Image (cartoon, helix red, strand yellow):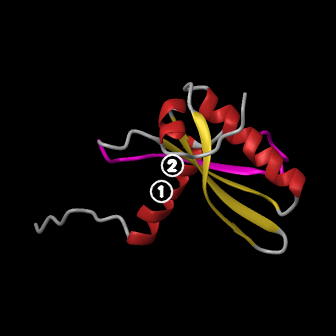
Amino acid sequence: MNHRPTRIPTTTAGALLLASALAGCAGLVPPGSDIAVTSYQSGDRWLNASFYIVEHPFSDDGAARAQAKADQLCGGSQRVAVQSERACSLAKCTTQYVCMKPEDAKASGVETRAK
């Protein structure tokens, strides 16, 4: 008999990886919300930081709610949310936030909202 190891097709492995990543984000936003949050952690040992990508409506209210959500998520670990990137279409924006220690954010000259 010729035994061959069973291989998972690349598309199946990718789908499983995506499903597990999305499952890790469950509970970050309430059902029916127009804001979506994806979280990830830096894999670099020298950069111990959490990152959040927030998709929100392209409006002042959407931006304010995205910032408030990032503040809430980073505040749980006693860090401040610092906006690092933003890209918008006519309908939606994707904004990335980095959770930083308040003293690190201040030392880098980044402006954060006063709490």
Please state the horizontal and vertical placement of residue 90, each as a whole percent of the image. Answer: 83, 74
Name the residue beneath numbered marker 1.
16
Question: For the stretch drawn in magenta, what is the main secondary structure?
Answer: loop
Q: Secondary structure at mark 2?
A: helix
Mark 2 Cα-neighbour bin, 10 Å: few <14, some 14–19, many ≥20: few
In the rendered image, the vertical position of residue 83 relative to residue 29, given as above or below: below
Q: Quadrant of the N terminus?
A: bottom left
Q: CA distance from mark 2 to mark 1?
A: 6 Å
Q: Is residue 74 magenta?
A: no
Magenta residues, as a range?
A: 28-45
Residue type marked 2: Ser
Mark 1 Cα-neighbour bin, 10 Å: few <14, some 14–19, many ≥20: few
Q: Quadrant of the C terminus?
A: top right
Please state the horizontal and vertical placement of residue 88, each as a whole percent of the image. Answer: 74, 70
The residue sitting at 73% across, 40% down in the picture is: 69
Q: Secondary structure at mark 1?
A: helix
Please name whichever residue, 101 or 29, is drawn nearer the observer in this view of the structure: 101
Name the residue beneath numbered marker 2.
20
